[in-house]
């Protein structure tokens, strides 16, 4: 349980730092574009892991019936 909370805090902080990097006007444009691409890939990875978890839960529920 503790490691899930720690990983969630880490993931949220990583997204916040990425968002601040992507929206900062002090940085060069290519760094901001790179940060935006990383954020998009990170969110896509998170969504696919959520979908996989939901499918596993559904499969275990149908197996138990």
Image (cartoon, rainbow, N blue to C red):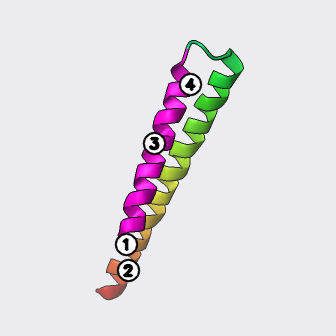
Q: Which residue is mark 2?
A: 60
Q: Which mark is residue 22?
A: 4
User: Cα distance, mark 2 to mark 3?
Assistant: 32 Å
Q: Which residues are magenta?
A: 1-24
Residue at 55%, 37% in the rendered image: 39
Work out whether mark 4 precedes mark 1 in sequence or the reverse, and give the earlier one: 4
Q: Are marks 2 and 1 in contact (CB under 8 Å)?
A: yes
Q: Nearer the viewer, residue 63 or 50?
A: 50
Count up the numbered dots.
4
Structural crowding at the residue carrying mark 4, measured as other residues with C-alpha within 10 Å and reported as few (<14), some (14–19) or many (≥20): many
Taking the magenta stretch, the answer to whether it contains residue 59 is: no
Counting from the top left corner in percent of width and height, residue 65 is at 28, 86
Quarter holding residue 12: top left
Q: Secondary structure at mark 1?
A: helix
User: Cα distance, mark 2 to mark 1?
Assistant: 5 Å
Work out whether mark 2 precedes mark 3 in sequence or the reverse, and give the earlier one: 3
Q: Secondary structure at mark 3?
A: helix
């Amino acid at each position: 349980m503790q490691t899930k909370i720690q990983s969630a805090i880490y993931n949220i902080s990583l997204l916040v730092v990425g968002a601040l990097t992507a929206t900062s006007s002090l940085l060069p444009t290519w760094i901001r574009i790179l940060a935006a691409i990383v954020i998009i890939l990170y969110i896509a990875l998170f969504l696919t892991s959520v979908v996989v978890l939901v499918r596993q839960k559904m499969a275990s529920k149908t197996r138990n019936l």
